[in-house]
Image (tube, grey):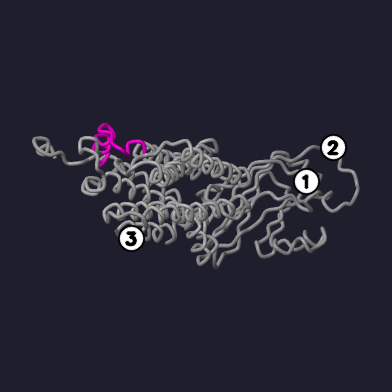
């Protein structure tokens, strides 16, 4: 049972060990109106790491930028946190690096970083600190900004911020693991689904959730593979990955709630001649659907509130905090339900089944809140990777645990009073035994 956790720790160590950090590409327009309103237009935020960091700025209208006396201001995160208490002119003079935008292309070397640090880029011009004065209708200045860290060879040419480095390799390894596991287990799983049984619906939903997880990982890999080359990636594919992840989570929640509610309700209205089956009563379905709607709404809200790269594991927003509270609340509800079931169950084998089911449920729901707390022990550039990698691995392990439970031959044979013909992956008696 400890092998999955050893695998989690091994992958986390490999990702955190120091994959080469890199950069991103930002395109847009420098706006005098936005710069005046914000006392410096926020262009982007980037985490530089090590030596040879580089910022490349390309202007699309150099004469207009010169006429406006345009500036690109770079602040470290420590300096940026104190800007709100300064006047507009003081904000401009506090910049760590001031770039006068007078050339079509400007390359700015970033000072060596002893530790990964966040830098903010702000735009300002001659109209930024003028109070009430009119802004001439000259239009905005188009730009393309490249922010680059050094690769393994010491050259600034790849495309990830320090807190994102290594995620591309992680998804590559994850897809490889999915492929190998699929080659090994897809045939037994298809046989189990064809045989049917009391948990057929649960196995179908579990399989759908796993397929959605794998598809989300594939989309993330495709997006990051493109992002590593141009710093832009494929935003549509990234959004699709997040949407597939949401579908996977809501399908898992519906299955877990339906089973737990169904087992609880069935104990009071019918004898246990058919235990451990999917219950489809209106009450259990309604309660499961309510939980799914709440979870889905919070997941969509989280996506809308934070559109940064890999924000699907974000936890700093209000929606992210409510989402973690919901997961903890769901875990407590399931614990209460399963405790009532286990405390009145006389069969030791059935109790073992329910306890194993509890482990899979709690791992699914509690991994995210637990990893968010654990990530606080790490440096800032490691926190996102701890949460992202940990949640994906833990939820995948949870699916595997439930698969092993539902497909267990000996346990299903003992806990269910149904005929072995209707049970998935059971050993039939008599002549059919030789086929296994």
Q: Which residues are magenta?
A: 184-202
Q: CA distance from mark 1 to mark 2?
A: 14 Å
Which residue is more in the foreground, 118 or 260?
260
What is the crowding at mark 3: few (fewer than 14 residues within 10 Å), some, or many (at least 20)? few
Q: Which residue is mark 3?
A: 6
Mark 2 surroundings: few (<14), some (14-19) or many (≥20) residues within 10 A: few
Closer to us: 260 or 328:
260
Secondary element at tag 3: helix
Query: Quadrant of the rendered structure where residue 11 is?
Result: bottom left
First of labels 1, 3 by sequence position: 3
What SS does tag 1 mark? Answer: helix
For the residues labelled 1 and 3, the Cα–Cα distance comes to 50 Å
Towards the viewer: 306 or 147: 306
Tell whether label 3 touches label 1 (CB within 8 Å). Answer: no
Q: Which residue is mark 1?
A: 34
205 to the left or right of 197: right
- Mark 2 = which residue? 137
Between label 1 and label 3, give the one nearer the viewer: 3
User: Pointer 1: residues within 10 angstroms few (<14), some, or many (20+)?
Assistant: some
- The Cα–Cα distance between marks 2 and 3, rounded to whole angstroms, is 62 Å
């Amino acid at each position: 049972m400890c092998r999955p956790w050893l695998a989690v720790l091994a992958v986390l160590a490999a990702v955190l060990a120091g994959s080469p950090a890199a950069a991103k590409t930002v395109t847009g327009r420098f706006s005098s109106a936005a710069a005046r309103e914000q006392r410096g237009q926020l262009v982007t935020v980037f985490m530089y790491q090590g030596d040879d960091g580089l910022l490349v700025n390309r202007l699309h209208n150099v004469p207009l930028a010169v006429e406006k006396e345009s500036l690109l201001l770079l602040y470290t995160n420590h300096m940026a946190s104190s800007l709100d208490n300064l006047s507009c002119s003081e904000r401009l003079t506090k910049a760590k690096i001031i770039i006068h935008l007078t050339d079509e292309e400007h390359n700015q070397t970033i000072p060596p970083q002893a530790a990964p640090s966040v830098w903010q880029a702000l735009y300002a011009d001659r109209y930024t600190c003028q109070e009430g004065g009119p802004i001439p209708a000259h239009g905005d200045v188009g730009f393309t900004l490249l922010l680059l860290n050094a690769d393994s060879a010491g050259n600034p040419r790849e495309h990830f911020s320090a807190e994102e480095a290594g995620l591309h390799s992680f998804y590559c390894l994850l897809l490889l693991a999915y492929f190998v596991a699929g080659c090994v287990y897809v045939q037994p799983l298809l046989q189990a689904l064809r045989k049917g049984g009391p948990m057929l619906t649960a196995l179908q939903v579990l399989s759908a959730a796993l397929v959605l997880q794998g598809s989300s990982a594939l989309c993330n890999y495709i997006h990051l593979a493109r992002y590593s080359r141009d710093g832009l990636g494929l935003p549509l594919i990234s959004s699709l990955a997040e949407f597939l992840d949401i579908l996977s989570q809501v399908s898992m929640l519906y299955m877990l709630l339906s089973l737990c509610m169904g087992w609880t309700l069935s104990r009071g209205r019918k004898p246990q001649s058919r235990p451990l089956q999917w219950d489809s009563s209106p009450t259990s379905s309604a309660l499961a659907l309510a939980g799914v709607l709440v979870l889905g709404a919070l997941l969509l809200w989280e996506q809308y509130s934070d559109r940064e790269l890999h924000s699907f594991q974000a936890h700093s927003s209000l929606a992210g905090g409510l989402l973690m509270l919901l997961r903890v609340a769901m875990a407590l509800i399931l614990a209460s339900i399963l405790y009532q079931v286990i405390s009145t169950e006389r069969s030791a084998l059935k109790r073992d089944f329910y306890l194993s089911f509890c482990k899979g449920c709690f791992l699914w729901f509690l991994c995210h809140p637990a990893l968010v707390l654990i990530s606080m022990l790490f440096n800032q550039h490691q926190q996102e990777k701890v949460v992202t990698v940990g949640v994906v691995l833990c939820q995948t392990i949870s699916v595997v645990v439930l698969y092993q439970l539902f497909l267990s031959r000996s346990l299903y044979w003992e806990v269910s009073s149904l005929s072995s013909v209707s049970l998935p992956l059971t050993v039939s008696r008599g002549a059919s035994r030789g086929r296994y």
